[in-house]
Amino acid sequence: MKKIIETERLIMRPFTLDDAQASYEMNTCPEVMEYLGGPFSGSVEDISDMLQENTLGDYEKYNFGRFAVIHKETNEFMGFTGLKYVIELDEVDIGYRLKHKFWRQGYGYESTLPCVKFAFDDLGLDRIISLANPDNIASTNLMKKLGLTYEKEVHIYGDNAVYYALNKSDWLKTNG
């Protein structure tokens, strides 16, 4: 995947293995991982392996994936946002995770909105979904702000999740 997206405050670019340390720091933060099974307990090398296998592998396999989110002004790694094909559901998920210090500043919406556009305009997808822990109100509020609507609860990755979806036709009605 070669796509780079810029917003007023952000650069969203493909991950590299150089992002492993910053990713590790984010994924070991208790606040960030509260609704995701708790802080990551592996090593930086484990994160590097997961980036290589999953994220970079998705770029090769699907020509899309999660973007590393970088703060334009400071060049700091902030987290990720972007698309992921979920084999278990045969759907494309829009997901996001930001370092705690970047919460409640509008970065979630600023980083995900262009990914919705990318999904529908560039990739030609007809539908995207998003999954979250049912107790993660901030995440479900972001889904709603993006225009996704609740459809059901699912059991995935060993846990329950709310399942929101957005069809391209509905997106075009308000963003066409």
Image (cartoon, helix red, strand yellow):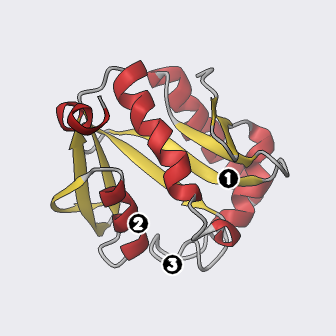
Counting residues from the N terminus, which is met first, the one under dot 2 or under dot 1?
1
Label 2 belongs to which residue? 139
Nearest-to-viewer mark from 2 and 3: 2
Q: Can residue 42 be seen in this view?
A: no
Local secondary structure at mark 1: helix
Label 1 belongs to which residue? 47
Count numbered badges in the picture. 3
Quadrant of the frame with the C terminus: top left
Residue at position x 47%, y 74% in the image: 37
Would you place residue 59 above or below residue 27 in this image? Answer: above
Quadrant of the frame with the N terminus: top right
Depth check: give the residue in front, 121 or 160: 121
Depth check: give the residue in front, 139 or 173: 173
Task: Look at label 3 and name its amino acid.
Answer: Glu
* Distance (Cα) linking label 2 and label 3: 12 Å
Label 3 belongs to which residue? 34
Depth check: give the residue in front, 53 or 1: 1
**Left or right position of 64 against 20:** left
Would you place residue 19 above or below residue 122 in this image? Answer: below
* Distance (Cα) linking label 2 and label 1: 23 Å
Counting residues from the N terminus, which is met first, the one under dot 2 or under dot 3?
3
Local secondary structure at mark 2: helix
**Left or right position of 175 against 113:** left
Task: Look at label 1 and name its amino acid.
Answer: Ile
Residue at position x 40%, y 38% in the image: 116
Quadrant assignment, res 33: bottom right
Counting residues from the N terminus, which is met first, the one under dot 1 or under dot 3?
3
Quadrant assignment, res 155: bottom left
**Given contact means CB atoms under 8 Å apart, are the residues at marks 1 and 3 in contact?**
no
Residue at position x 66%, y 74% in the image: 29
Image position, residue 18 (x, y; %): 81, 42
